[in-house]
Image (tube, helix red, strand yellow):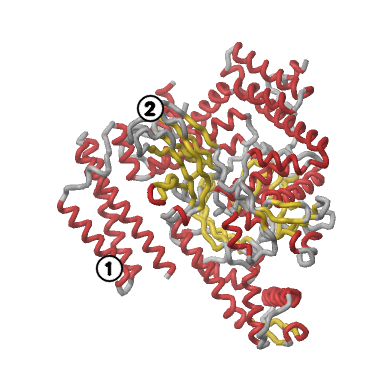
Amino acid sequence: MIIDKNYFEVFGLPEQYSIDLSRLKVCYRELQKEFHPDRYASGSKSEIRLALQYSTYINEAYERLISPLKRAEYLLFRKGVEQDQAKTMSSDAGFLMQQIAWRESLGDVRQASDPDAALETLSDQISHEQLQMQQAFEKSYLQLDMETALAALDKMRFVEKLQQEITLLEEELIDY
Amino acid sequence: MALLNIAEPGQTPEPHQRKLAVGIDLGTTNSLVASVRSGTAETIEDEQGQSLLPSVVRYFKDGYVVVGERALQAAAADAGNTIVSIKRLMGRGIEDVSRLAEQLPYQFESRQDNVPAIKTVAGAVTPVQVSAEILKALAERGRQSLGGQLQGAVITVPAYFDEAQRQATKDAATLAGVKVLRLLNEPTAAAVAYGFDQQEEDTTIAVFDLGGGTFDISVLRLQRGVFEVLSTGGDSALGGDDFDHSIAEWILQQANWQGELEPSSHRRLLEAARQVKEQLTESDEATISLEDVVGWKGTLDRVQFYELTDPLINRCIRSCKRAIKDARIRVDEVDNAIMVGGSTRMPRVREKVGELFGKPPLVNLNPDTVVAIGAAFQADVLIGNKPDNEMLLLDVIPLSLGLETMGGLVEKIIHRNTTIPISRAQEFTTYKDGQTALAVHVVQGEREMVEDCRSLARFELRGIPPMTAGAARILVTFQVDADGLLSVSAKETISGIESQIQVKPSYGLTEDSISDMLRASFEHAKEDRDARMLREQQVEAERMLEATEVALIADGDLLLSCDERHILEQAMAKLRCQHDTGDVASIKREIELLAQASEVFAERRMDRSIKKALKGHTLDELDEEE
């Protein structure tokens, strides 16, 4: 049964950080075409129940794998690595300074002569860092260095939150 | 007796019989019903040749009900008993409604279940009951035109409708005796009507829906026959009526009118404003003569008209920009913009939308009927008339679902724009020693405080074994189905105590109150009701039998052992027997028994489909498994 498979198996993907995203998307759609409850709208009750269950599971699996952050979390979960988010906040002094600098830039955006451009520059910069963190995660994951992988994941979480704040600010600027 | 009814292998039972299904656009101002006949979808007209049914219901003293044009005509004369725009009240609690109440001519009655009920000469009626009357009228129109009992309907809802509003819509259908195949988002229906589902290449579509009283914008993506709603937005208090109001205000200014207007004069004024708006669609200038109303006549030209109405259109455009942002795309990635709703006939609206997207919007389908047409296509697919159709509509949840935590804060469990169906589990624990119950409060919305969100349900999980604080592990699971409807289950994982709750909105209807309403609505015709309930169960039984037979013919030999097949066939025979001779309860019981008996078979069939779905993509992995 599909719900007995892990999220990678659902889409026939190898269990690793770098995955073929276009293949994930294609397989996702093919599976939903087969199992979405709409396909069984005139089916028997048991088919309708199963379709809901399967389709839900496929959506869950897709959501976890399509996000670079959630995919990393899932890989560590699969390896049995405990992820206590409260406990592990980075002790990396350089990164702490970087965090403060980013926060300050974000705070300054509103006062900038061209807030949109300032926000875009900041967002690009962060996206670049994000990519490097993902690479760092993958490298230590492959080397089975889970402690370093966990530290990279922590940074990824922070940056994800920062990107969300940027999106909120972007929306605010549109309204304005 | 009916044991030998099983069709020969290779023969599908009743191969060419078309099933009757309709698409229903249940609108704020007008509603429509449409169906697919000989390949094309058409709206179904009434005897006078009208396809639009005004969404107006008038109640009379003896319980007699009139729906549509005739009710609309009485809206002014008998305002208290003639209900208009009921869609705005669907799924709303007493508190929401009391905020609106000042603008409404109705008297509300508060009831224990927190459902607002409108007092009429025929007694108090709830929004669900009023909507059910509209649905009944549409279903009856469909039944007469198609010449038989409807087997299902697709009903459209605004994409931003929350769970309570969707549930209320589904309840109204249940009450009207209409089987809902799917609640379909209106913009998705419009995109289906335009045939985007038939198209090979990937495409991104913006659906711009400016109706009489509401504005909705949705961004959809279609990839390989799968529709996804990427984002939705809009303004529930902005519509074509606001254009009329701003023209009316301008007229009052020109006329230097100070005092109040009689209701009848006010209607005349608004009517004149609407005519001006429509005239300016064709010509550059419109004349107004309202000497007998406000003592003024004059003209309004296009330039002035734009000055008056551009602020309204700009509000729409701002919502569009936000929706595009929410969809995480750039505006030039939108391949097509579709216009829906009568107000999009205004040239200025089309112009501004064209400017935003850098290409003229699609306007070749009637903006009034396009949603119903799309719903009809989807109904035809879902009822099984088009087994080869590959179309699939994936929807997202429009508003986040969350739980109340300490201090009145909301913890979001499922974020908005998550693709449904979806389920999410959250673990809770007790905060006092020996605590044996846990209160759960489910809310929907984007805000951080509980009081700013919509309360959906409160329930208590009882019977937790007494433990020290923080020791219990209570897993609460949210399941949202493909219609966007929520059910919640909770389980104490250490003791295994489990409770299953079907969430109904706090001010929604319980199953009991629905059946009470059903009973009440058929008080005068008990035989009718019994006959219909029996017929409904029989139709359900036929559906079940047919689905099982088709499955047996296709895969019975392959996937079932002789014994298994025998058990299944026995269950079918029993159901067939009850279908012919039994009562409602016994048919219902046999349906459930057959469902249980066919569970394993269904499971095997679906697991086999996985291979089909992944064919060509993951052959290696599949081979390994075999």
Q: Position of residue B119 (x, y in %)?
A: 72, 56
- Give the quarter of the figure containing the N terminus of chain B: top right
Q: Position of residue B524 (x, y in %)?
A: 82, 42
Cα–Cα span, label 1 and label 2: 50 Å
Write down the quadrant of residue B523 in the picture: top right
How packed is label 1: few (under 14 Cα within 10 Å), some, or many (20 or more)? Answer: few
What secondary structure is marked by label 2?
Answer: loop
Query: Foreground: A26 or B506?
Result: B506
Q: In the rendered structure, the residue with mark 1 lies on which chain?
A: A
Query: Foreground: B516 or B225?
Result: B516
- In the image, is B138 to the left or to the right of B626? right
Q: Position of residue B583 (x, y in %)?
A: 76, 26
Question: Does the image show residue B469?
Answer: yes
Nearer mark to the viewer, of 1 and 2: 2
Q: Which residue is mark 2?
A: B494
Q: Three-letter amino acid code at disc 2?
A: Ile
